Image (cartoon, rainbow, N blue to C red):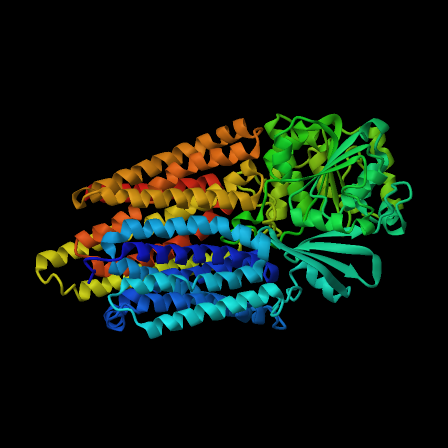
Amino acid sequence: MEKTTSPSLSLCGGVFLITFSIISFEITLTRLLSVVLSYHYVFLTLSLAMLGLGLGGMCVYLLWSKIKSWNSNFILLPSLASLFSLSISASVILIIIISHLDSLNSITILLYCGTLLLPFFTAGVLLAYVFRLFPTLSPKIYSADLIGGALGSLGVIYLLNTLGGISTAFLLGAFASTPAFFLITTGEKRNKKIAVLFCTNFILLSILFGSSVTGYYQPTLAIGRNPEKEIHDALTKFNGEIVETKWSAFGRTDLIAFGDFPNHMDIYIDGTAGSPMFKYSGNARKPGERADLLKTSFPGYFPFLFLEEEERNNALIIGPGGGRDILLALMGGVQEIITIEINKDLVELVRKYSWFNGNIYAGQKNVKTIVGEGRNFIKRQKDKYDIIMLSLPVTNSSRSLEGYALTENFLFTTESIGDYLDHLTDEGRLLVVGHNDFEVLRLLSISLAAFKKRGINVTRAMSQIYIVGSDEYPVFVLKKNPLKPATVFRMYPALHQFKLEPILSYFPYIKQVGSINPALMALGSGHIVFEGFEKMVRDRGYDIRPVTDNRPFFYQFEVGIPKPVALVFWSSAILMGLIIVIPHLYVRKKPSRSKASFKNTRYIQKGLPRSTALFSMIGMGFMLVEISFIQRFILFLEHPVLSLAVLLFSLLGGAGIGSLWCSRFTPSKINKVIYLTALFIFSMILVYTYLLPILFNQLMGVDLTTRVLTSIIVLVPLGFLMGIPFPLGIRWLKEKNLENHIPWMWGVNGASSVLGSVMTIVVATSFGFTESLLIGASCYLIVFLTFLRS
């Protein structure tokens, strides 16, 4: 029974702090889990844990009669807030303990999921209970919920950059205990003993945070135990030792030294994307023993051996990491080098260890280092280069809120190859160092697709490409114009001299059978078409289809939907089905006692499917739109973390304003406002889907501040509209005497949000993010049609 005079300010304050903590904790977990798990398991673990929000709503719905008796003095709300705060800190400690287990297997993954389920389940119970108690206040409550999430998405980035992952998590545990002091004022009676208990909880969690910051208590994640991470071999096989660590919202950056190899260090981001740093004298003519060895031992130096003098004027190196590619360019005689590195922590580490690497980032007069994203940089300027060089990282780390979508980037897509070609001089070349044949074949695939867009057929395109075969570091080279036969005939014999693999290589004009890769030779001579070549690779279980900016999953070589994604998809779909179906059956067998007449019973049974459609579609649609937009804004805003922050702040902040604004509507207008708002959202998403790429292209050259402001201006109106249907749906249930089912609808919304996030990845990996946006728009179209009929 709703209180007639409810303290809305304290209630909304408590909800604001809870959701601030939830979104901040979720993003922090992405960083923590990425250190110990590969990105697909981060996605699996977080998605299953997030189902706790929906399960919490179902718990309130099924146990409502008992919960009412427990809350006679409104003690349950602050108690749940305190339990939520305790579960945050406890789950972090348990994650650290689990990370030290000897092996990573399915049981370990289940332990992670079970550990993280509790804080989200507790939050789900609390928020569902609040909406059930105060349905008429739902616009204000939901506004506080969304604005808390919006500010949390910004605040956690500052915290991660300042405190690191573990200390941030402990701080959030202490911070999450403060809503108890707001929520305890919602009751008529204030129990001083209970208040003292909440104060004690806050003090203890604050002491835990203080201990972690001051170093008195420093728990550490057991990095290196996951054999799928590169750092595992560095620490175990080669007896490496972590000498310095930096935490930020981008990830954890570790510098590793090797006692057996004193002239070699490695830098890892979240235990993967390893990059070597070599001992360097600072003089390219006498670089030192280890650096000089690269000329004969590393295939990436091979293309520099055959450059003409006029082909060495300048180079753009994207993602130089520890500086190996800079060394290659310096020793290869390149006169001017510009490097673009996205990880600021890595740049600081390399500069800090200038005594070891010859101050390769700042001490060379002809080397300029810029912190930024490579593709964004190249699209925003018009300079041309003789060499554009990249080294493919081993990407097993997550960059995104939901653990998957931002793992990929826009450096290796069909459109990116076009951008690189546009920024090469007439004799310029793109040089990419890979790790295996499938990466090289995917590079070949997107390059041929880029040439096709320019009207160049496969045979001509293959005359502009050569591949240096190697068991460990194959090299893909793409020239702006066809290679000269004389140059090719100089390069091919040198493969044997440098102990490379001719049978894994490809060079145009080489016709002798058995001298190079036969399939690539047949492709280059026109004896087979690329579609046949692609099918041949696919029959062996690998997908090398061209990837685009719309579907930028370069590293997805597995045919079909990745197994962890499929597991989460079917798990969340089944759970959502159960959440929807089982209560429906219960309602039909046991109608509400509050309306005993047959007429009202039939009305309730008709109203529930409509409300189920509303809450499931807005939950699913919101996530489809949100995640797809995050990916689209990365290239425009230059950095994945910035894209995440700006989009969440704009969408959630705008939604919070919209939720607050919609409280002005009278009950008679609720139905009409819901379907009109859904129609406007549907229309706006359609317009944005096709106009945003044009807007981004026009504004790519302006400064970052202008681009951020433009993004906010574009997103806030959409967020404003997306914040209206949920609180109006709660009020609609109240007005139709269906308030008993509010926790159930909260559960439906929570489960559908998880399903929407995984559906985004399923659709995007299969078709693209544009298609994900269109499906998200169709969810709001369903809401429009559902409420238009009523």
Say which residue appears at 34% left-offset and 38% top-offset: 681
On the rendered image, what quadrant is the N terminus found in?
bottom left
Say which residue appears at 56% left-offset and 30% top-offset: 700
Residue 261 visible? The answer is yes
Say which residue appears at 17% left-offset and 52% top-offset: 735
| Quadrant in the picture for residue 199 | bottom left
Residue 109 visible? The answer is no
Q: Is residue 691 toward the left or the right of residue 135 in the image? A: right
State whether residue 378 is above or below residue 230. Answer: above
The residue most toward the bottom is: 193
Nearest the eye: 445 or 184 = 184
The residue most toward the right is: 286
On the rendered image, what quadrant is the C terminus found in?
top left
Give the total of numbered labels: 0
Q: Is residue 415 toward the left or the right of residue 602 in the image? A: right
Nearest the eye: 139 or 510 = 139
Q: Is residue 505 toward the left or the right of residue 598 in the image? A: right
Q: Is residue 140 toward the left or the right of residue 632 in the image? A: left
Q: Position of residue 562 (x, y in %)?
A: 53, 54
Q: Position of residue 521 (x, y in %)?
A: 74, 38
| Quadrant in the picture for residue 738 | bottom left
Q: Position of residue 159 (x, y in %)?
A: 54, 54
| Quadrant in the picture for residue 337 | top right
Q: Position of residue 744 (x, y in %)?
A: 28, 60
State whether residue 578 is above or below residue 771. Answer: below
